[in-house]
Image (cartoon, grey):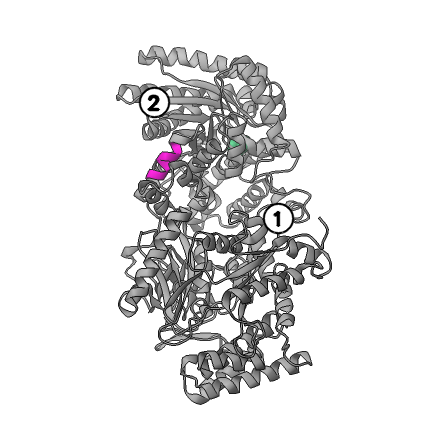
Amino acid sequence: MTDATKRYVYSFQQGDGHNKMLLGGKGANLCEMTQIGLNVPPGFTITTEACLEYLGANRTLPGSVMQQVREQMAALEQMTGKGFGDAHNPLLVSVRSGAAMSMPGMMDTILNLGLNRHTLQGEIEQTGDERFAYDAYRRFIQLFGKVALDIPDELFDEPFEAIKHREGVREDVGLSAENMKEITGLFLEVVHSQTGRPFPEDPFEQLELAIKAVFNSWMGRRAIDYRREFKITPGMANGTAVNICTMVFGNRGNDSATGVAFTRNPGTGVNEFFGEYLVNAQGEDVVAGIRTPKPIARMRTEMPDLYRQLEELRGKLESHYHEIQDFEFTIEKGTLYCLQTRNGKMNTQAMVRTSVELVEEGLISREAALLRINPESLEQMLFPRLDAHAGATPIACGLPASPGAASGHVVFDADRAEQQGRTGKRIILLREETKPEDIHGFFASQAILTSRGGKTSHAAVVARGMGKPCVAGAEGIEVDVTARRAHIGDVIIKEGDLITVDGTTGNVYLGTVNTVEAEFTDELKTLLSWADQAARLKVLANADIPVDAERALKYGAMGIGLCRTERMFNASDRLPIVLEMIVADSLEQRQAALDKLLPIQRHDFIALFKTMAPNPVTVRLLDPPIHEFLPSEQQLISDLKQLRHLRDSLRGAEILSDTISLLFPNGAQGGSGLPQVIRVADSSLVDEAIDKKEAILKKVRSLFEVNPMLGHRGVRLGITYPEIYAMQIRAILEAACECHKQGVDVYPEIMVPQVCTPEELRAVRKNVDHINKQVSADFGFSPIFKFGTMIEVVRACMRAETLAKEADFFSFGTNDLTQATFSFSREDAENKFLPLYNESGILRDNPFEVLDTHGVGKLMELAIGWGRTTKPDLKIGICGEHGGHPASIRFCHGIGLSYVSCSGPRVPIARLAAAHAALLQPTA
Ligand code: PEP
Ligand code: MG
């Protein structure tokens, strides 16, 4: 279609309410609301295509856009009976942005467009209200000046505040018509002096400049930052639409009002009407926090008939959209208008509650309820709460605007918050009120605190969307940004001071207050139980000790997919024995140490198995290179130097046993209960210590490897020291028998790390079979267990067909498999070149976080195919970090894995992600 015939503009009666990509979310909803008969002021939408063409053509509007706009303006004139630029009965319009994805406050809006010196008189004539007309004019000049002419806000704010101050009024409603007239004159001068020309008088020139300004705001810093932070790709929203809508006024007297409302409480999800309004005010006043609005419930008594109409509108919106709506309304001289609606942004707690309740109310299906919630967002429900027993006394209280608690250092502006946040400091952004240009400060902060504004103020809405705690409108706090101080009565908070903000209660505390972990709500339990029914993948947890297992169980883990046994060796009571095992010169010595470790490991496994019973527990045999349990060579050399110095220079002196302990962290000297003071000359302790250190040093040197991650580790250790694996295998099987004896059915799975050949696996399996015979004979019971392998080296993927002959299950260790596939060190890459790779687009994601489906994933697919050629029902899972990442989980579902295993706190996220995967790829 040629430029001249292409359609760029749709009236609200014509536009397709489902085509958000073309009309933007706001435009599509205005069309839809108009078409279902809600009272929307007439208007039209310029498409996102026009925006993209404008930006692509060096900021030139496609030729026919203004022609189409003029046609629509003529239609508006017909509908309203007013004239655009008419000096007696002027038509005024708002010009608003609106992309396919909601980006609240990130782009620009202009109100009251069409006013000039002549139409102003017409507006006075029509309304008989000079003050109102001048108020509308000064607002228009300021907004237009800022948005379309790039004039800084302060140049308007300063004279405005000066006049308020002179007149002794706090709120602008206290200003007279004369004051407004004076302000208008000053604002026109500001524009003239800043632009070198008078304020544009021609309404169509105003309109064209406003349309261009809104299109430009798509490429503004705020909008770009927001898209980057929320990962809004061009596939999700490409350009902004412009909505041009007949102005209706909430500031036409006490029978007029404006407000913002949610069909349910967005902080808690409770099914109660939630919102705020201001009588005799324009819409921006509510959001900007300039005046503190009243709760919507007050309208029930203040404007009962309109409240009833508003309740009706609330019901209609929910039953039409089947979703919680966040809508703006204006009452002009007793008539209610709906100006916009969008799906309500809520914190996760509210999303979960409303999901469950919308199903119970029959408005949506269980599947829709599950798909409504982003799995990653569940992390918010694990937000800490303030410890009720901490007994702290609040120093201030505001509105609980976004739940959760956080402590941090106070910072008074967004730039500094960003700077300091980068250094890793925890920041609380404290402002009188926030504006959209503060968005980068939000990203850098743990929580937001404002002294003005309501629960629908900018600060509150943005913090809720980000899941960050926010207390808004804490009016007891006086913020002095210039002095970088705030006062609360006699208390002074300086920049850098520590405070705690509780967005659940609205309280603010000095210093850090202890927090406690969040509890699972009943609604979350219900939702996750639906997720488990919908999912095909099972979700297990990576857990090494009983407390972690208990937590994982609470989060709904269906077993343990990876217990890294080396973590058990690191405990301080075991390390000395592990050292004995490592430095042993002979098999006998090593066996003696292993004999001491056996009961300890058995005890560990009994506790773990019992915690998880009857769910499976996958125990991985020792994996890391054994030198990881030893001190470094450098440390040993330095310790020896000190010890020898001690022996030579302090003979006969007394030294504190603390000094010796210092040289032997983890009790490596092999003894405990040293006397408080020892006489070195009388004691052979130092000599003995030196001997032991020298033996360890010798071992460290003999174990040295240039590439330990590719060295003597995993199954290689099990082959060279079969007695180590034998001890672990025995501990697992004996623990299973012991549990059985105590009446607890347990299902251990023995997993071998770093396998690359079937021969390795066969050798370990032989060991397992042999020990199993002995244990079964000893206990008179044959434990039920599985034997399997990790698939974490490339050759294991390639030999999956033969490995499957030896294994009952596979578990992809995608941490090592990613390392091996890329030849990127998992220890170093993320601190060295990976950030640059990501920033420059060489790699889209960090492959250690997001599974590389094209490379690592391809290997996995091959291995699964080959493994299941040998054993069609082979159980296959993943236990690398990717097992808790939603997009990776979706891939794992698609390639036919049986389970994912991830860290405990990510289990709920993985359960929901597994359900999403099944619902979105039902045939996989
Ligand atoms: C892996 O490599 O993915 C794995 C789970 O093992 P680890 O992280 O312990 O090496
Ligand atoms: Mg590994």
| Residue 374 image point, x, y percent | 46, 44
Instruction: Determine the residue positioned at 39% across, 35% down.
Output: 531
Residue at the (29%, 65%) spot, across then down: 305
Q: Nearer the viewer, residue 326 or 266?
A: 326
Secondary structure beneath disc 1? Answer: loop
The image quarter in which residue 471 lies: bottom left
Q: Position of residue 415 (x, y in %)?
A: 56, 66
**Is residue 529 on the magenta stretch?**
yes
Residue 288: image location, x then y, percent: 46, 69
Relative vertical location of residue 23 with respect to residue 872 in this rendering, above or below: below
Magenta segment boundaries in residue numbering: 526-532
Disc 1 to disc 2, C-alpha distance? 51 Å
* Three-letter amino acid code at the position of disc 1: Pro
Q: Secondary structure at mark 2?
A: loop
Q: Is the residue marked by circle 2 packed among few (<14), some (14-19), or many (20+) residues within 10 Å? A: many
Q: Residue at x 50, y 35 (%)?
A: 692
Query: Label 1: which residue?
Result: 234
**Does residue 305 appear left or right of residue 749 in this picture?**
left
Tag nearer the camera, 1 or 2? 1
**Depicted 747 relative to depicted 275: above or below:** above
Question: Magenta region's main secondary structure?
Answer: helix
Q: Is residue 83 above or below residue 469?
A: below
- Would you name the residue on which mark 2 appears? 746
Q: Is residue 457 visible?
A: yes
Residue at 61% over, 18% down = 799
Q: Which mark is residue 198?
A: none
Q: Quadrant of residue 758?
A: top right
Residue 626 makes an appearance in the image: no
- Position of 492 with respect to 824 (left or right) is left
